Amino acid sequence: MRIFYWIIKILILCVLFFFSVQNMHSVKFNIFAEHGISLPLVILMLISLTVGAILGVFAMLGRVLSLRSEVNSLKRAKKKAEKIAGKLEESISSKDNE
């Protein structure tokens, strides 16, 4: 099964490599109206992919932190509930022994 995954990864890498070789012509990227830079299309696409991924991580950061906080509070509540349940079991077993 590992060999299958490696073959798939190599095929994807080859497709991406040939795609990048085919798109090496320069395009002008205008930052402002008159100012722009010329970059190969593949580099511009990689930059936009990276910027998009970083923005996506920042967009999800608040939700991840709030969920992590909720998980921690639920863990504390679980520990309290387990402690109370243990005390109840002890009191019930001590009453049964009397």
Image (tube, rainbow, N blue to C red):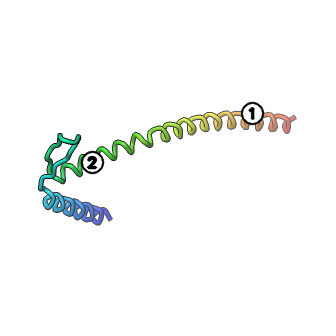
Q: Specify which label sits upstream in the sequence, 2 or 1.
A: 2
Q: Which residue in the structure is indicated by mark 1?
A: 87
The relative height of residue 81 versus residue 21 in the rendered view (above or below) is above
Residue 61 lies, in percent from the top left, at 44, 39
Q: Amino acid at mark 2?
A: Ser
Q: Is residue 48 left or right of residue 34?
A: right
Residue 65 percent across, percent down from the top left: 49, 37
Numbered disc in front, either 2 or 1:
2
Front residue of this view, candidates 41 and 81: 41
| Residue extending farthest front | 33
Spatial CA distance of label 2 from label 1 is 58 Å
Residue 92 falls left or right of residue 15: right
Quadrant where the image shows the N terminus: bottom left
Towards the viewer: 14 or 87: 14
* Secondary element at image label 1: helix
Front-most of 5 and 21?
21
Q: Residue at x 87, y 34 (%)?
A: 98
Q: Horizontal placement of 86 versus 20: left or right?
A: right
Graded by Cα atoms within 10 Å as few (under 14), some (14 to 19) or many (20 or more), the crowding at tag 2 reads few
Task: Tell me the SS state at disc 2.
Answer: helix
Pointer 1: residues within 10 angstroms few (<14), some, or many (20+)?
few
Q: What residue appears at the point 23 percent right and 64 percent down from the top-left corner?
A: 11
Query: How many numbered circles does the render carry?
Result: 2
Of residues 9 and 51, the one nearer the viewer is: 51
Q: Tell me the quarter of the picture where residue 22 sits.
A: bottom left
Q: Residue at x 67, y 33 (%)?
A: 80
Residue type marked 1: Lys
Q: Which mark is residue 48?
A: 2
In the orientation shown, which residue stands out farthest toward the right? 98
**Looking at the image, is 19 positioned above or below residue 54?**
below
